[in-house]
């Protein structure tokens, strides 16, 4: 058995493939999805989505969105999703450093937005390092 993984952003369909497993950043922690998984709808957090295709592990940096699991189909709707080749490492490093600096003086009103930017920069760097 296999899963069908579809990853879509507002701009494009990034992935449509058969995979053995998917790991993604759910709102309450990382979720592991295998064939036969119970139906599920969940919010996604910013992080790294991993999947196995032909025995090789692949990864995407994603930001907030939703996942639906039903009948061995995993549909991911993300605000942002980037493959390793799409990531400008220097830009991601600059974004990470800037967010870390801003966290030092952040107000309560801006804290969550800065943390989200930092998490996305860290996810982008983790995926780019693959």
Image: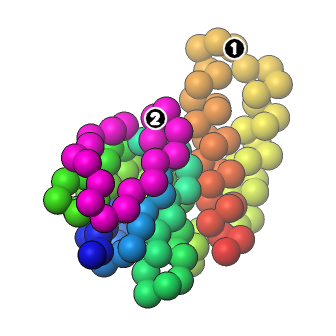
Q: Quadrant location of residue 124?
A: bottom right
Question: Residue 94, percent across and down?
Answer: 75, 53
Disc 2 residue crowd, few under 14, some 14–19, many 20+, Cα 10 Å: some
The colour scheme of the drawn protein is: rainbow
Q: Residue at x 52, y 74 (%)?
A: 58
Q: Which mark is residue 27?
A: 2
Q: Is residue 19 above or below residue 72?
A: below
Which one is nearer the viewer's eye here, 31 or 86? 31
Instruction: Report the span colored magenta.
Output: 26-43
Give the secondary structure at mark 1: loop
Residue farthest bottom in this picture = 54
Q: Is residue 22 above or below residue 15?
A: above
Residue located 33% across and 39% down the image:
42
Picture coordinates of residue 15, whole percent (x, y): 34, 72
Left or right, 57 with reference to 103: left
Residue 107 in the image, given as x and y percentages of width and height? 69, 14
């Amino acid at each position: 058995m296999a899963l069908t993984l579809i990853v879509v952003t507002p701009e494009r369909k990034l992935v449509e493939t058969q995979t053995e497993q998917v790991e993604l950043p759910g709102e309450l922690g990382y979720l592991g999805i295998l064939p036969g998984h119970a139906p599920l709808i969940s919010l996604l957090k910013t992080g790294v989505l991993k999947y196995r295709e032909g025995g090789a592990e692949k990864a995407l940096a994603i930001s907030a969105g939703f996942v639906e699991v039903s009948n061995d189909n995993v549909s991911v709707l993300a605000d942002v999703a980037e493959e390793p080749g799409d990531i400008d490492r220097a830009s991601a490093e600059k974004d990470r450093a800037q967010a870390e600096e801003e966290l030092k003086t952040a107000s309560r009103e801006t804290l969550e937005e800065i943390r989200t930017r930092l998490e996305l920069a860290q996810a982008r760097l983790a995926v780019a390092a693959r």
